[in-house]
Amino acid sequence: MKDLHYFELLKAAILKKYQAHYPEWQEPLQAFRRREIEQFQQLVQEQVGSRISERWIYTHLKADKAEKLPRIDMLDLLSQWVGAESWQRFKADQALPAPTTSPVRPARKTLYLITLALIGISFSLAFWWSPSYRYTICLEQKQGPLPVDWSQATCTLLWADESPQRRPFDAEGCLEIKTTDRELTFVLEAPYHRADTIIRQLRKRKSSERFQLQTDDYALAIHYFSEGAVSDWKKRRQQLDRMIAPEAEIIQLTPDGQLGMELYDKTDFINKLTLPLSSLKNLRIIFTEYNPAGQIQKLRFTQEAN
């Protein structure tokens, strides 16, 4: 219970520092709206170098009163943001008055010890009986022309009280998740497939599920175009013009797919992909993002050796 009290003090310190940057804000943390949340996220990102998810803010900062202490890494992060070295240092810096003690009579002392023992047993039982879940995800390929390397597929787990966690699938396209959370939110991604966000309520201690992701037809088309699989150059340019948004952000990455090498606009990309002496061949599409009109607005790719 004392740690929850310290957490309320930390929330007060967070509000005070936020108001130092935005003095016009005179409401409590519970009244934060999207703009205040984004401003707070940016301050933490700039000053500590880490990002706090919006879901975490709703769960722990906007709640009227904390019933559960957040993870220690998040407490350390926010303690550093308000000026302390760590969560333990923040607690030590708070000058809490020492509780007054009074003599305890023998009978009351015995009752006190029994109560403590019962509380300890209750916590132990709650710990050992807390549910844990093993949930296995497997990906299946719909009938398509391009075989999928499942080792390149990923599952990004979105937790309520910590940063997202990116996990790879094995060569068979399966991944086992162990958690004590009953609700899971995750994003499935695979080469040449559309990303899909899934929410699941876990009701069994051990369960499994298979998913088929939607094929990313435009990414496949660009891949085939880069291999010279189409002979009608004019038709190819018309197709690319329909597929790609006018202000698309197109970036060629290093061979390992980690860093940006070159930025293209739509016209330059189409020219280099379709002209007879084109320099863009054998493309491997890493990432696509679509606008509401269904056109590619972001594209990331690498160029494989011939």
Image (tube, rainbow, N blue to C red):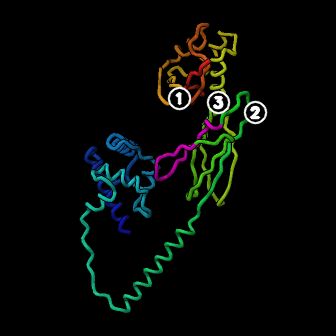
Residue at horizontal 67%, vertical 20%? 224
User: Residue 241 versus residue 162: which sits nearer the camera?
Assistant: 162
* 65 to the left or right of 13: right
Q: Secondary structure at mark 3?
A: loop
Specify the amino acid type for callout 2. Gln
Quarter of the image for residue 144 reads top right
Q: Where does the C terminus fall, quadrant-wise?
A: top right
Q: CA distance from mark 1 to mark 2?
A: 28 Å
Q: Position of residue 289 (x, y in %)?
A: 55, 30
Where residue 210 appears, as percent x and y from the top left, is 70, 46
Graded by Cα atoms within 10 Å as few (under 14), some (14 to 19) or many (20 or more), the crowding at tag 1 reads few
Q: Which residue is mark 1?
A: 256
Quadrant in which the N terminus appears:
bottom left
On the image, the x and y values in percent for residue 72 come to 41, 56
Q: Secondary structure at mark 2?
A: loop
For label 2, count other residues whose C-alpha is less than 10 Å away and answer few (under 14), some (14-19) or many (20+): few
The residue to which callout 2 is attached is: 143
Q: Quadrant of residue 116?
A: bottom left
Q: CA distance from mark 2 to mark 3?
A: 13 Å
The residue range painted magenta reads 150-167
Residue type, mark 3 in image: Asp
**Does residue 27 appear in this view?**
no
What residue appears at the point 56 percent right and 66 percent down from the top-left corner?
Answer: 130
Residue bearing mark 3: 216
Can residue 286 be seen here? The reply is yes
